Image (cartoon, coloured by chain):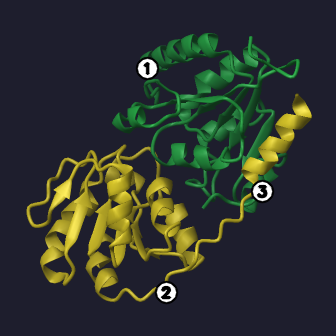
Chain colours: A yellow, B green
Amino acid sequence: MIFVTVGVSQPFDRLIKEVDRISKNIPDNMFAQIGRSYYEPGNIPYKRFLSQKEVDDYIEKSRIVITHGGFGSIFGVLSKGKPLISVPKVFELDKTDNDQTDLVRLLEFEGRLVGVYDIKMLEKAILEFNLAPKRFNYNTKISEDIDRQIREWF
Amino acid sequence: MNKTGGKKQIKLCIVCSGGGHLIESKLATMTLRYPKYYVTFYSPHHRHEKEKYYHVINPYRNLARFIINFWQSLIIFLKERPDIIITTGASVVISTCMIAKLFRKKVIFIESSGNPLTASATGRLLYRMSDLFYVQREQQKRFFPDARYMGSLL
């Protein structure tokens, strides 16, 4: 199973179209949450919006998850220790207000996902995927630090 | 007024755009046991959650929408009277943070890790105004020298 999700706030037709086009060459079953994308796939099952529980279930049973480069989707996959291919939205091609390339490149540099920056390389990235999953290492102390600061203020 | 042990109970306002920013905000406030409410974009999932949500419109690069967003934010602020604003951006939070500073309330800004190598426009705008500012990558101290770094949420 390969689950594809592009978040729920902005369309990502470039990715959904390509996934639909290459699905016949991919041995796995695919399912897409297309969010606000305008393009509707003809070759794979999809839904516009899934509940958080449904998203989590699809991630759990997937061999690979494909997401856009948004924090929410990436966190959802990496926090479950699942293999991830991420395709960032870019200013010029996706009419977005937020270019996701930096985040995807940085996480790829850290060895936590496979980034696809040219959509034509997606099929190859899926077929040749061999990134070992990493345990999610939650190392932030932001919440504890805010708590300490609030007690200092009040 | 809500009293506990003779001290006024502190109330948190968590304001951010939807999707990843909201997930980030929840992670960054995970350990805070104060009454809190959220100000964010509309999502059909919110009514299934037990947290308290208010919805505002996206003011992104449109003066009329910014004025509506400001008005919505002001009404919510006057109704709830929060003591601390915690935010991960983006532009949807500007009104609430400005209102909070007019009322001499504390603003805590967490620069989103969706934007790991540059400085977000909202972050630059609210940096000097914030009482506490976090970055999630140490390199970003280049843009925000007084920021705290406490690890990354991703």
Q: Position of residue A66 (x, y in %)?
A: 35, 68
Q: CA distance from mark 1 to mark 2?
A: 46 Å
Mark 1 residue type: Arg
Which element type, helix, strand or loop, lies under badge 2?
loop
User: What numbered label is drawn on residue B65?
Assistant: 1
* Relative horizontal placement of residue B4, taking residue A22 as reference (left or right): right
* Distance Cα–Cα, label 3 vs label 2: 27 Å
Picture quarter with the C terminus of chain B: bottom right
Residue nearest the viewer, comparing A82 with A86: A82
Query: Residue, x 58% and y 53% (percent of image)?
Result: B115
- The amino acid type, in three-letter code, at marker 3 is Met
Q: Quadrant of residue B64?
A: top left
Q: Which residue is mark 2?
A: A132
Going 71% across and 38% down the picture, which residue do you hit?
B33
Residue that mark 3 sits on:
B150
User: Which is in the foreground here, disc 3 or disc 1?
Assistant: 3
Which is nearer the N-term, disc 3 or disc 1?
1
Q: Are marks 1 and 2 in contact (CB under 8 Å)?
A: no
Q: Tag 2, which chain? A: A
Residue extending farthest to the right is A152
Q: Circle 1 sits in a helix, a strand or a loop, which is it?
A: helix
The answer for how far apart the CA atoms under marks 3 and 1 are is 35 Å
